[in-house]
Image (cartoon, rainbow, N blue to C red):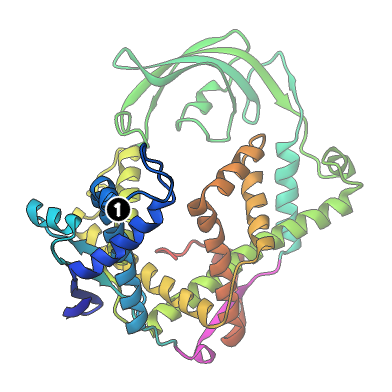
């Protein structure tokens, strides 16, 4: 066998491979000898079928299997000898001439082909001890607790039907038929819509025009859809709604007291305040950890520079680009609506793809060097968390992940990434930085 490197271009490798017919023939004889004890052919005792007869019956199919096996064997041995790691399965360019291929299968010609692959780059890790990041810190205040308690009190108020005109804060049950230019439109009709006047969950101006109506009243309401309305065919258009009021109910006062705590299953208001404080601080911790992680990833991206495998970048870009275009199509928007062009968007998202691949390779290298792995217990914990997102379908979700290695790998990936991030943060210089609530909860631009 002869394997000759013919081209090196960055991370791309190409080889010319020649496997002599004699070597293929030896492999074929070994395979046919093993078949003698396996096949049952009429007229021959088990194990007594002549080799030439077996070759006539099974030679081509057995040789095809041998060729496939040797392709993998050559690739594996070449990578091992060169101490390289391929990005994905190698590409093979086999003989295209049908007669030449037939000769190979018959054992009368050498197998000559081209093998190519991309290799993983050498990742030289930065000194993590030189990385300095700031952890944004905000402690929940009594005012934060009070705001949350007030929202809880308002959301758990009881409503009682009233025989009076609707006012702001009342809950109104209506049926309506929406029309544009006198014609009904999809999604513009409802028989039992329930809304609270003042919540602002309907089209601007709709709720306000219900003030003063009583049960049994009918009214035609005129509104204009916002210019940035999600459904593009409705955006900016004027519509009328023929409304019939079915019921008006007023809410009990929103009182923060022991009774509110009891309605929520807690002993008293003090216990409720403690619970709310814990929940809020957990939310703030999640926001803080996310911003800290973003800073760290920015530093890692900035401090590492190595060639990226084109195949991985292209794969990541295709995934991002498909998601972006699917989202635009669902929203009925264009690149012009987003203030850009397709060409500019492609360039921006390719940079994002390159960043993700670079960070992924860094994470992988850190994990491999430091033997960071996701344990079975951590995998099961992630699986249980995923199952909780689908009440009533827990068993189906569990079966899906256990039967799909790809899905299970996707489940472990964020756990592995977080463990690597935690490892690096232990080595980096992390200082706490007090921030306002608004600063902590402000969304960062870009992507992780």
Position of 152 compared to 215: left or right? Answer: right
Q: Is residue 137 magenta?
A: yes
**Element assignment for label 1:** helix
- Which residue is drawn at the image coordinates 10% and 55% (left, top)? 96
Q: Quadrant of residue 378?
A: bottom right
- Of 404 and 80, which appears nearest the observer? 80
Quarter of the N terminus within the rendering: bottom left
Residue 318: x %, y % from top left: 29, 55
The range drawn in magenta is: 126-139
Residue furthest to the top in view is 216
Query: In this picture, is 403 found above or below 347?
Result: above
Which residue carries the number 1 mark?
62
Position of 326 compared to 340: left or right? Answer: right
Position of 36 compared to 163: left or right? Answer: left
- Which residue is drawn at the image coordinates 30% and 38% (left, top)? 332
Q: Is residue 90 visible?
A: no
Q: Is residue 81 magenta?
A: no
Q: For the image shown, how many numbered marks are present on the structure? A: 1
Query: In this picture, is 164 found above or below 125?
Result: above
Q: Is residue 24 visible?
A: yes
Residue 84: x %, y % from top left: 35, 79
- Of 259 and 39, which appears nearest the observer? 39
Neighbourhood count class around disc 1 (C-alpha, 10 Å): few under 14, some 14–19, many 20 upward: some
Residue 141: x %, y % from top left: 73, 64
Quarter of the C terminus within the rendering: bottom left
Residue 329: x %, y % from top left: 30, 40
Q: Quadrant of residue 292?
A: bottom right
């Amino acid at each position: 066998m002869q394997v000759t490197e013919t081209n090196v271009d960055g991370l791309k490798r190409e080889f010319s491979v020649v496997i002599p017919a004699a070597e293929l023939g030896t492999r074929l004889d070994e395979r046919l000898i093993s078949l003698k004890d396996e096949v049952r052919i009429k007229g021959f005792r088990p194990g007594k079928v002549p080799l030439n007869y077996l070759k006539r019956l099974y030679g081509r199919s057995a040789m095809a299997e041998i060729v496939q096996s040797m392709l993998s064997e050559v690739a594996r041995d070449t990578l091992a000898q060169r101490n390289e790691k391929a990005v994905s399965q190698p590409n093979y360019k086999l003989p295209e001439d049908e007669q030449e291929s037939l000769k190979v299968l018959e054992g009368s010609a050498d197998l000559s082909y081209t093998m190519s692959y991309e290799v993983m780059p050498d990742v030289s890790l930065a000194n993590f001890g030189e990385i300095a990041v700031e952890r944004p810190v905000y402690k929940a205040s009594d005012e934060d607790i009070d705001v949350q308690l007030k929202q809880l009190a308002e959301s758990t108020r009881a409503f009682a039907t009233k025989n009076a005109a609707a006012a702001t804060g009342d809950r109104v049950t209506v049926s309506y038929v929406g029309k544009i230019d006198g014609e009904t439109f999809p999604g513009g009709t409802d028989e039992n819509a329930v809304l609270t006047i003042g919540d602002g969950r309907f089209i601007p101006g709709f709720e306000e025009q219900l003030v003063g109506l009583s049960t049994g009243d009918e009214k035609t309401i005129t509104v204009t859809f916002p210019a940035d309305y999600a459904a593009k065919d409705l955006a900016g258009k004027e519509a009328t709604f023929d409304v019939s009021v079915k019921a008006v109910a007023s809410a009990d006062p929103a009182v923060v007291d022991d009774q509110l705590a009891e309605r929520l299953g807690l002993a008293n208001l003090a216990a409720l305040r403690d619970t709310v404080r814990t929940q809020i601080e957990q939310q703030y911790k999640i926001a803080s950890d996310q911003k800290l992680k973003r800073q760290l990833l920015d530093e890692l991206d900035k401090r590492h520079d190595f060639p990226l495998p084109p195949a991985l970048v292209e794969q990541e870009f295709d995934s991002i680009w498909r998601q972006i275009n699917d989202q635009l199509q669902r929203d009925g928007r264009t690149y012009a609506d987003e203030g850009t062009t397709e060409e500019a968007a492609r360039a921006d998202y390719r940079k994002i793809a390159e960043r993700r691949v670079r960070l992924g390779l860094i994470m992988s290298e850190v994990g491999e060097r430091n033997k960071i792995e996701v344990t079975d217990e951590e995998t099961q914990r992630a699986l249980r968390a995923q199952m909780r997102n689908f009440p009533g379908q827990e068993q189906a979700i569990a079966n899906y992940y256990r039967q799909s290695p790809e899905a299970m790998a996707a489940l472990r990936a964020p756990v592995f990434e977080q463990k690597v991030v935690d490892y690096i943060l232990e080595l980096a210089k992390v200082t706490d930085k007090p921030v306002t609530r608004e600063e902590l909860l402000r969304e960062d631009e870009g992507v992780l």
